[in-house]
Image (spheres, rainbow, N blue to C red):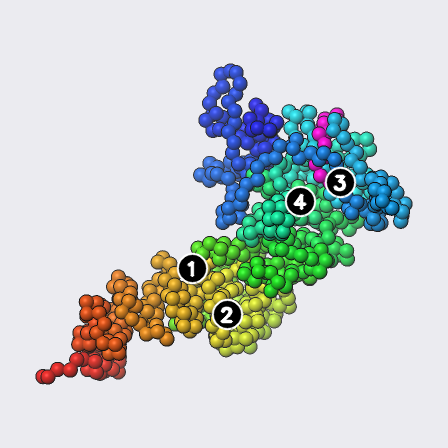
């Protein structure tokens, strides 16, 4: 069965087109065929194309049977990314293939070659004037050539730092379109060696985000990799199109879309790393989007981890600074990912010169100023010390997803909650004051040798401290737990000693900084805490707990404006962090922003254990309006909130007293304002309000837990009761 998609010449194999990934309609695929031509297949998104390996296909089919359906969405479903239509291969062949003179360099010594002289164009073939090595930048294949007796060349698609890329038809497999990647300069021995290395291991690479290698063939003493044709547009092409549509001025991608692209391809990079391979040349040009799928397309620079002899390929502006001295690594691969994200999302001028290895200053970019978490992410991804970067593609993806949630929440004004693998959720918050004890707790790393035994510790802090100190050996997690328990019992000095031991095991462990921050707050040193939590935020910019801790430390220090900004990001992204919500409300009130405080308290989810506390704080905020005293509208709103609220009798009586007292103060100041208005069943007259308050205080006296409080409530009742003649 041939694929029925216009312009596609693939063949239906095992139910799917082997070129574009289309599948027949379910009804067509299941209907018996009695004769004649089979029904044409219906189009489905290319992102549902099954993986090539048997295992991967089995997993996908299991997912479908379990009820999951529809295309996988880029950016965890948080971002709407415009699909890129499949491009007809015949339309992308270069009419006049050639290598620009400014991209011609000697493969041996790196000197410019093939350049114009005295008005004459440079030669595409010749010898280097510096070292004498031959060079050739002319395509070796022309339309009609039959490579290895199987692949008929249609023309050149593109050229790059390592080789020409040709489009061809596979005459042995239903004339499907394939791509042949040859050498840019066949005399370059390093390039030839790299191509031979590709032949050894690239056929084993099987991942949906990586272009598939079909074959490796030789033709007239030249080698060619045969790979699938991915019809779409590179990220470079997408940016170029945006620039052209913007009148030739830079037009970076929306931040959320750029992040979504990176999140989509990081699993492919993680796959390579898990198989001992480094991509080395991750950049805009080497990622193609087609439909809703992204793929790494140029494996020419792939390098085996530990290989100390093969040449290393990369691109200026993307490559990590340590490559020349220590070679490629997982950290250098992730450096190129951070560079690519920056180039996509910023108007990143000077990325190949002034800021070749660094992030531009935050104040120079509106994007970095608006999205501080993105700035922190890029700063860690491009850290000068490879050990300070992300340690794996999975870790990078986890933090980047957290950054995306913050970006989307800020852009759309709607929460985007998500569970953390590093921190527990928020504890029940204190609505009245910041409390370091209510901060989220660190999760125990499962890989730690003591993880299982630590999960069983549920004794009092003093007992846990004694057990941990008696242990013959102490792992990092044991040291961190000891520090936590010592902080809880007030032994900050002992906690610092425990943290120093953990730091000796791993001086880059940001969890040490977390507990140093907690210790600083417990000891009344908010400045020290802010410095420690800033280090945590730099290491895990996608974690809301890091920004929450910074907000708590800022509030402890009296910097309520900064605290409010930090709390707003946390609460706006995930309202279940009620510590941030109540902190935001307190800070807004301190800044005399009553509407902002009311909005914060109103955002506590109804499903939260702190919902009632949030409603009570709304009432408190309405009654005590700060610089502007509460009016009739505010008191009526407070009464309406209280009426259905599920609080006990004593709390209801307390709040009722506050509302009636505020109403009485209003009437005493301004007189009877609205004769028809009523608050908690009382008219806005002095006598009626005094009678209500007297009754309320006597109710509180009956419910008082102590004799002194009961006497005080009776005194208040006598004080406010209306005067009588009898």
Q: Give the range drawn in magenta.
A: 146-159
Which numbered marker is on residue 562? Answer: 2
Indicate which label's residue lies in the foreground, 4 or 1. 4
Q: Which quadrant does the C terminus fall into?
A: bottom left
Residue 610 to residue 654: above or below: above
Which percent across, then down, holds residue 452?
52, 58
**First in sequence: mark 3 or mark 4?**
3
- Marking on residue 233: none
For marks 4 and 2, give the CA distance.
41 Å
- Viewer-nearest residue: 260 or 429: 260
- Judge whether residue 664 is colored magenta: no
Direction top: furthest residue: 35
Q: Which is more N-terminal, label 1 or label 4?
A: 4
Does label 3 or label 2 sit earlier along the sequence? 3
Mark 4 closeness class: few <14, some 14–19, many ≥20 residues within 10 Å? some
On the picture, is 628 further left or further right than 366? Answer: left
- To which residue does mark 1 refer? 575
């Amino acid at each position: 069965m041939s694929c029925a998609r216009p312009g596609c010449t693939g063949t239906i194999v095992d139910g799917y087109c082997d070129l574009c990934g289309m599948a027949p309609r379910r009804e067509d695929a299941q209907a018996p065929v009695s004769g004649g031509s089979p029904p044409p297949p219906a189009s489905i998104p290319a992102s549902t194309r099954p993986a090539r390996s048997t295992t991967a296909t089995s997993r996908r089919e299991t997912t479908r049977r379990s009820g999951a359906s529809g295309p996988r969405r880029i950016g965890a479903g948080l971002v709407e990314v415009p699909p890129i239509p499949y491009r007809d291969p015949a339309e992308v062949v270069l009419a006049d293939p050639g290598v620009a003179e400014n991209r011609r360099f000697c493969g041996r010594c790196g000197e410019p070659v093939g350049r114009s002289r005295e008005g004459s164009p440079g030669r595409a073939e010749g010898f280097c004037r510096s070292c004498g090595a031959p060079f050739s930048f002319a395509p070796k294949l022309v339309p009609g050539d039959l490579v290895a007796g199987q692949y008929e060349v249609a023309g050149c698609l593109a050229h790059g730092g390592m080789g020409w890329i040709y489009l061809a038809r596979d005459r042995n497999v239903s004339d499907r379109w394939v791509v042949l990647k040859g050498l840019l300069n066949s005399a370059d021995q390093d390039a030839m060696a790299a191509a031979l290395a590709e032949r050894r291991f690239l056929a084993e690479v099987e991942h949906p985000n990586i272009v598939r290698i079909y074959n490796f063939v030789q033709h007239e003493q030249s080698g060619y990799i045969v790979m699938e044709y991915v019809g779409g547009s590179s990220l470079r092409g997408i940016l170029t199109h945006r620039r052209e549509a913007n009148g030739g001025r830079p037009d970076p991608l929306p931040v959320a879309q750029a992040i979504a692209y990176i999140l989509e391809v990081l699993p492919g990079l993680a796959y390579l790393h898990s198989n001992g391979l480094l991509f080395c040349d991750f950049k805009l040009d080497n990622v193609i989007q087609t439909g809703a799928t992204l793929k790494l397309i140029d494996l020419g620079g792939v390098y085996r981890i530990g290989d100390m002899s093969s040449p290393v390929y990369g691109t200026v502006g993307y490559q990590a600074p340590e490559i020349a001295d220590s070679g490629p690594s997982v950290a250098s691969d992730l450096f190129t990912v951070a560079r690519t994200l920056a180039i996509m999302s910023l108007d990143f001028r000077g990325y190949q010169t002034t800021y070749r290895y660094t992030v531009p200053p935050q104040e120079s970019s509106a994007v970095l100023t608006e999205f501080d978490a993105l700035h922190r992410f890029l700063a860690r991804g491009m850290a000068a010390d490879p050990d300070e970067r992300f340690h794996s593609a999975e870790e990078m993806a986890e933090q980047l997803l957290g950054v995306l949630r913050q970006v989307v929440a800020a852009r759309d004004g709607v929460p985007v909650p998500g569970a953390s693998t590093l921190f527990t959720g928020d504890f029940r918050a204190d609505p009245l004051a910041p409390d370091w004890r209510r901060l989220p707790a660190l999760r125990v790393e499962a890989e730690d040798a003591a993880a299982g035994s630590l999960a069983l510790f549920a004794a009092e802090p003093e007992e846990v401290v004694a057990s941990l100190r008696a242990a013959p050996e102490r792992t990092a997690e044991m040291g961190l737990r000891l520090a936590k328990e010592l902080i809880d019992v007030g032994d900050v000095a002992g906690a610092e000693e425990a943290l120093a031991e953990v730091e000796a095991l791993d001086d880059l462990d940001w969890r040490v900084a977390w507990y140093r921050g907690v210790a600083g707050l417990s000891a009344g040193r908010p400045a020290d805490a802010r410095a420690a939590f800033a280090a945590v935020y730099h290491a895990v910019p996608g974690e809301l707990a890091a920004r929450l801790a910074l907000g708590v430390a800022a509030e402890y220090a009296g910097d309520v404006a900064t605290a409010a900004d930090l709390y707003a990001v946390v609460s706006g992204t995930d309202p279940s962090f009620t510590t941030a919500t109540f902190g935001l409300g307190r800070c807004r009130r301190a800044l005399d922003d009553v509407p902002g405080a009311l909005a914060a308290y109103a955002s506590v989810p109804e499903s939260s254990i702190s919902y009632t506390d949030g409603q009570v704080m709304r009432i408190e905020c309405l009654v005590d309006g700060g610089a502007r005293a509460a009016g009739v509208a505010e008191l009526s709103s407070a009464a309406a909130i209280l009426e259905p609220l599920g609080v006990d009798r004593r709390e209801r009586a307390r709040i009722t007293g506050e509302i009636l007292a505020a109403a009485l103060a209003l009437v005493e100041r301004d007189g009877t304002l609205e004769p028809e208005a009523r608050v908690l069943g009382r008219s806005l007259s002095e006598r009626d309000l005094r009678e209500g308050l007297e009754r309320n205080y006597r109710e509180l006296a009956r419910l008082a837990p102590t004799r002194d409080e009961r006497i005080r409530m009776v005194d208040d009742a006598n004080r406010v009761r209306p005067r009588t003649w009898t």
